[in-house]
Image (cartoon, rainbow, N blue to C red):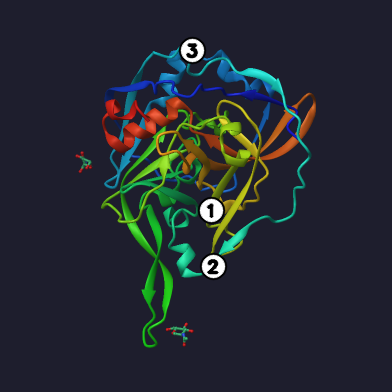
């Protein structure tokens, strides 16, 4: 199991930081030459897992600046500034011991969702396919959250990112006999946003910022899932995460799974949910208590990234990893969706 965890600790009710855009620079058009690597694998040790401790606010500003690529190939870089009401926010991680049973890893715990009825039901219906081979989740009527590595390899945009599309499983009438089947209907993307924290060159592949947002050309009628700042695992029902995706070993099927969180850092959620490459970019959700509505609600708290070998106390552990939506990342994505950071501070 996870030998030690660094509790991310965001006390409930902390304000969301304001991420204020500063300037937008025109960049050269991307070359779109990168080969997509859908199965992301990284290595990390304790120093790497805790490096965030050493970061200064200007580092966050650097990582939360972002690139935008439009359908016509135009690329811009937008710099941001944080308004630092941050005292309670990304506080130093508290170290604590966790006791956990070893997970059996290798039994396939995934369920293919069958029956149009279920597939068209929330939350499965919010799962979308990304034309570069990944999965994404609809998080507003016009926005899809996915993994950055599905679009950009850290140096350049992948080939398929130029004409990227988002696929929605949609019921269609079969010609002739009137039965209904599901077909993928592709929607066009007008804007792709990737944080600078991901675009850091080849020497430091870090999963911390492995997320991207796609803006559809037209709104989609389907119900989106809500995003929220990832709470500590203890605050989610059953301490579990869930996600559904288009795993590449089960073509044409939507695959759902859930599992317990085994450990987490500020940026990453470590778990052993079974997943194959096509599931990259899936919206990872938990059931989060909503004190206003007085019920558990499913909310997206992260993005499925890939695998990591984590070295702790000289031992290598293999995990599947999801990127956590920290308060800062949430503020950034919310700004991308709403276009006004002032609307993002009361989530
Ligand atoms: C490309 O699209 C963007 C956004 O719609 C627009 O601002 C820009 O002027 C366009 N560039 C060209 C060269 O057409
Ligand atoms: C209806 O037609 C589709 C192809 O058009 C076929 O795949 C399906 O099996 C048919 N269903 C029935 C009940 O005949």
| Quarter of the N terminus within the rendering | top right
Labels 3 & 1 near each other (Cβ < 8 A) = no
- Kindly report the distance in space between the C-alpha atoms of the residues bearing marks 3 and 2: 48 Å
What percent of the width, then of the height, locates residue 23? Answer: 27, 22
Q: Quadrant of ligand 1?
A: top left
Q: Residues within 10 Å of mark 3 (few under 14, many from 20)?
A: few
Q: Earlier in the sequence, mark 3 or mark 1?
A: 3
Asked if ligand 2 lies within 8 A of label 2, the reply is no
Q: Nearer the viewer, mark 3 or mark 2?
A: 2
- Kindly report the distance in space between the C-alpha atoms of the residues bearing marks 3 and 1: 36 Å
Which residue lies under the disc numbered 3?
A: 56
Which residue lies under the disc numbered 1?
A: 244
Position of 49 relative to 28 (above/below):
above
Mark 2, secondary structure of its residue: loop
The number of numbered discs placed on residues in the rendered structure image is 3
Mark 1, secondary structure of its residue: strand
Q: Residues within 10 Å of mark 2 (few under 14, many from 20)?
A: few
- Say which quarter of the image contains residue 94: top right
Numbered mark located on residue 114 in the image: 2
Position of 2 relative to 282 (above/below):
above
- Say which quarter of the image contains residue 253: bottom right
What percent of the width, then of the height, locates residue 17? Answer: 38, 21
């Amino acid at each position: 199991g996870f030998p030690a965890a660094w509790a991310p600790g965001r006390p409930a009710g902390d304000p969301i930081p304001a991420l204020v855009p500063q300037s937008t620079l025109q960049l050269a058009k991307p070359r779109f030459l990168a080969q997509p690597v859908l199965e992301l694998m990284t290595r990390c040790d304790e120093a790497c897992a805790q490096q965030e401790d050493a970061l200064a606010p200007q580092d966050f500003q650097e990582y939360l600046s972002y690139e935008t690529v439009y359908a016509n190939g135009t690329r811009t870089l937008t710099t941001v500034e944080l308004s630092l009401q941050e005292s309670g926010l990304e506080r130093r991680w508290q170290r604590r011991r966790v006791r956990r049973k070893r997970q059996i890893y290798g039994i396939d715990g995934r369920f293919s969702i069958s029956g149009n009825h279920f597939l068209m039901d929330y939350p499965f219906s919010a799962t979308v396919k990304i034309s570069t081979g990944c999965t994404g989740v609809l998080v507003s009527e016009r926005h899809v959250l996915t993994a950055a590595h599905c679009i950009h390899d850290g140096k350049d945009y992948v080939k398929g990112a130029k004409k990227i599309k988002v696929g929605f499983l949609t019921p269609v009438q079969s010609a002739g006999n009137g039965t209904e089947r599901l077909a993928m209907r592709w929607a066009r993307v007008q804007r792709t946003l990737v944080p600078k924290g991901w675009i850091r060159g080849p020497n430091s592949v870090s999963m911390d910022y492995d997320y991207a947002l796609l803006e559809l050309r037209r709104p989609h009628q389907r119900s989106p899932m809500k995003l929220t700042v990832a709470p500590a695992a203890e605050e989610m029902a059953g301490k579990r995460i869930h996600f559904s995706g288009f795993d590449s070993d089960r073509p044409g099927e939507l695959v759902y799974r859930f599992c317990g969180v085994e450990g987490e850092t500020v940026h990453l959620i470590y778990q052993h949910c079974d997943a194959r490459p096509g599931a990259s970019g899936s919206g990872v959700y938990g059931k989060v208590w909503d004190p206003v509505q007085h019920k558990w609600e499913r909310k997206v708290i992260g993005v499925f990234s890939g695998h990591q070998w984590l070295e702790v106390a000289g031992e290598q552990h293999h995990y599947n990893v999801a990127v956590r939506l920290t308060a800062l990342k949430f503020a950034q994505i919310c700004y991308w969706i709403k276009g006004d950071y002032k609307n993002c501070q009361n989530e």
